[in-house]
Amino acid sequence: MNLSEKDMQQIAQRGISAKKIENQLHQFETGFPFLKLEAAAAIGNGILAPTDDERKQYVSAWQQYKAEGKRIVKFVPASGAASRMFKNIFSFVDGDSSVPTTDFEKKYFDEIEKFAFYDELDAVCQKNEGKGIKELMAESNYKAIAANMLNPQGLNYGQLPKGMLLFHKYDDGARTPMEEHLVEGALYAASKGEANVHFTVSHEHMDFFRKKVADKADGYAQKYGVKYDITFSEQKPSTDTIAANPDNTPFRNDDGSLLFRPGGHGALIENLNEIDADVIFIKNIDNVVPDRLKPETVEWKQVIAGILVTLQQKAFDYLNILDNGATGEQLEEIAAFVEKCLCCQPKGATVDADYLRRKLNRPMRVCGVVKNVGEPGGGPFLTYNQDGTVSLQILESSQIDTDNKEYMKMFTQGTHFNPVDLVCAVRDYKGQPFDLPKYVDKTTGFISSKSKGGKELKALELPGLWNGAMSDWSTVFVEVPLGTFNPVKTVNDLLREQHQQA
């Protein structure tokens, strides 16, 4: 590894060890192994589909748990910039045509009044162009409208974080996703009148994000009768990864310094590890709906949380039995719970008290999965672990060997995918927090091709937060309705019926 003294200083400043950099450069050379699959998870084989009566019981179990005054936190990864949402509009502004030509561009301008940000955009057009949107469109000056949405002198939507864009219209004003998450926190994650919400935000947006939250939180606290405790964190520089040239040597900036890149959402396991909570909900910033559609989301969040605390209590009871010396009959009962309820198959492993304790005394998560309708997203699989056992995992396509026809058939015919709808139990049966980075499978990272300044580079992503970073957790999948999954990947997604007023 040809690193200079100056390189070593740069590495140390980020809080990264030289050994870690050495490992990362080695991973560029070797790549990451594909995972060995047993089957795509399905209803009856790894995915629960609770009945109406069971749903009521789980909601009740969650209400009871909340009444005990446990600390519940809603964790929202919100550091992504919105620039990708506007890729098509950037292309229009930079393109040769002065009028919309693609179906995407035509839809955007034809239905522009339906966007929650319409009034604000109209106001900045009046200020900067001396004309409103309708006048500018009548003159075929479409580019001015788009530029005023994207550029800093306008709404600056091309640079803002997604959580700060106006998504939904209401009679008393439009709301951002950040606000919708505050509302959700009050509706299903509040305990004893306190709603704890944690946002992970990028460094450059932190001050702006904090100010917006401070402006809005009191109004929602009064409306929903809760007290908010809202906290923030940034992705740590120590979780950045070194970039490499195509020949696997360190990629350097024009000034000769090493290039580091964010390690992807898997880096957030460090942020998650610092959350003081009994139960943590995880949901992406852009997966929100207006109030008229929230009841379904709120019900199902409570269902999956009720399943979590029910299973956790059972696991705790069994761990206490193991501590006191389990009988042969009890060991059989515990083994059946681990295999049937936690979907962990021993395969060749010896099923003894040590094995059962290891599989029970670890973090637990219940993940909502939705029927596959062609949206991008990781899929639920029964996968072989490092110890030879099989358990449930959320896999991305890059973790699957595309040359293996059997695996590709599993992936393409999978019935469900993961919409990032997780509820996590992160304390052990003695009330101590788990050290979450210990449960990461470090062999499940990703290598992707990127470029900087016209030069190709290889980027290393850490095991994804809900993929390899939670590989050694107890995992349970529950089918949830498609209505609970409404992500916004492009600006025109906001025109979908689910994001419009009734």
Image (spheres, rainbow, N blue to C red):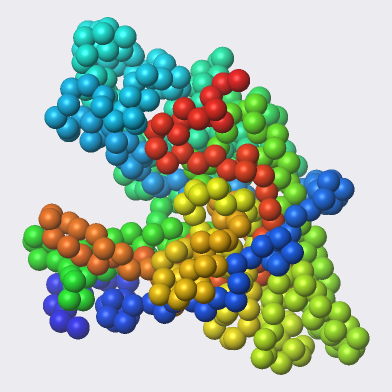
233 vs 499: above or below: below
Regarding residue 270, the answer to whether it shows in the image is no
Q: Residue at x 79, y 81 (%)?
A: 335
Residue 430 image position (x, y, % from top left): 74, 71
384 vs 450: above or below: below
363 vs 62: above or below: below
Regarding residue 24, the answer to whether it shows in the image is yes
In the rendered view, does 249 fall on the left or right side of 155? Answer: left
In the rendered view, does 336 fall on the left or right side of 240? Answer: right
Q: Quadrant of residue 228?
A: top right
270 vs 222: above or below: below
Q: Quadrant of residue 40?
A: bottom right
Q: Nearer the viewer, residue 250 or 502?
A: 502
Tell me how many marks there are: 0
In the rendered view, does 472 fall on the left or right side of 479? Answer: left
Q: Residue at x 55, y 76 (%)?
A: 37
Residue 354 image position (x, y, % from top left): 72, 88
Q: Residue at x 44, y 70 (%)?
A: 399
Q: Residue furthest left?
A: 255
Q: Nearer the viewer, residue 213 or 86?
A: 86
Question: Which quarter shows the N terminus?
Answer: bottom left
Q: Residue at x 71, y 92 (%)?
A: 350
Question: Which quarter shows the C terminus?
Answer: top right
